[in-house]
Amino acid sequence: MTAAEHAAAAGTATAPADRIAVALDVPTLDEARALAGTLSGHVGWFKVGLELFSAHGPSAVEAIAAYGPVFLDVKLHDIPTTVERAAARIAELGVGLLTVHAAGGRDMVRAAVSGLGDAGRVLAVTVLTSMSDLDLQSIAAPAARTQVPSLASLAVQAGAPGLVCAPKDLVAVRRTVGDDVLLVTPGIRPAGSGDDDHARAATPARALADGADLLVVGRPITRADDPAAAADAVAAGLTGA
């Protein structure tokens, strides 16, 4: 199945720009609004992460939603009751995507799905892209090649309609969970832009070819001299992928 067919099966748009979620990892709402205004129409999603949400809370989601769909990346990880209640509050904000840690277990993932309801889709994070196998070994965790497919399977069985995994884990995850699960991939770095703090990065075209549906891109777009042109360049590189 092609990348476009994967996206269609998962219920996502297939236009190249719609496959891009820009990470608004900035400290102030003014900066986030300015970027969102510049990038509206050039990307499919705006990702609000911990930095912006910690500083401005629900106001950040409400402000950015004026420019496009919001992907709230707060990686909930707590006891099931707490996660379900948090997800229910987040559902009231109208976010389209919400992350939780798959490592929280089946009951926690199931609780997140229940709490969010029909307001959006839960994305279960497998292993952070910043974690190398040496990092995982240091906390007595299995290597990514073993742990990621296992967590992916657990989360999907618990009802998660989407997953977050590193580019280099995409092929194994797609093979494990099949075609109907939305795969979101951070650690995306256009050729020549460097990996920053992602231990398992990849180019946009490579990630799409390996089965990704939605690509999270941050600094290569947000720190570019012309963010809109940078986003358009990423999208152009996905045409026909």
Image (spheres, rainbow, N blue to C red):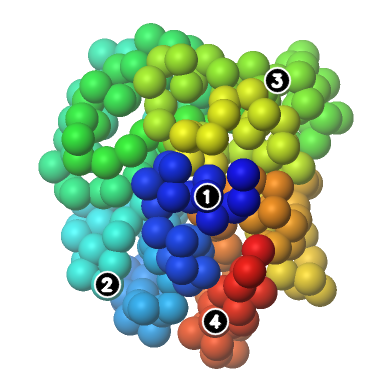
Q: Looking at the picture, does residue 75 appear above or below residue 28?
A: above
Using the image, tell me which numbered label, if any, was put on residue 45: none
Residue 196 visible in the picture: no
Q: Amino acid at mark 4?
A: Asp
- Real-space Cα distance between discs 2 and 3? 36 Å
Most foreground residue, 26 or 70: 70
In the rendered structure, which disc, 4 or 1, sits on the residue that comes first in sequence? 1
Q: How many marks?
A: 4
| Amino acid type of the residue that numbered disc 2 sits on in the rendered structure | Tyr
Q: Residue at x 40, y 31 (%)?
A: 161
Residue matched to label 3: 147
The residue singled out by tag 2 in the image is 67
Disc 3 element: helix
Point out the tag, 1 or 2, that comes first from the N-terminus: 1
Q: Residue 5 — which label?
A: 1
**In front of the other: label 4 or label 1?**
1
Secondary structure at badge 4 equals helix
Look at the image and tell me whether residue 131 can be seen.
yes
Pick whichever, 177 or 67, lies toward us.
177
What residue is at 44 percent from the left and 50 percent from the top?
8
Task: State the residue position of label 4.
Answer: 232
Q: Badges 1 and 2: C-beta atoms under 8 Å apart?
A: no
CB atoms of marks 2 and 4 within 8 Å: no
49 to the left or right of 69: right
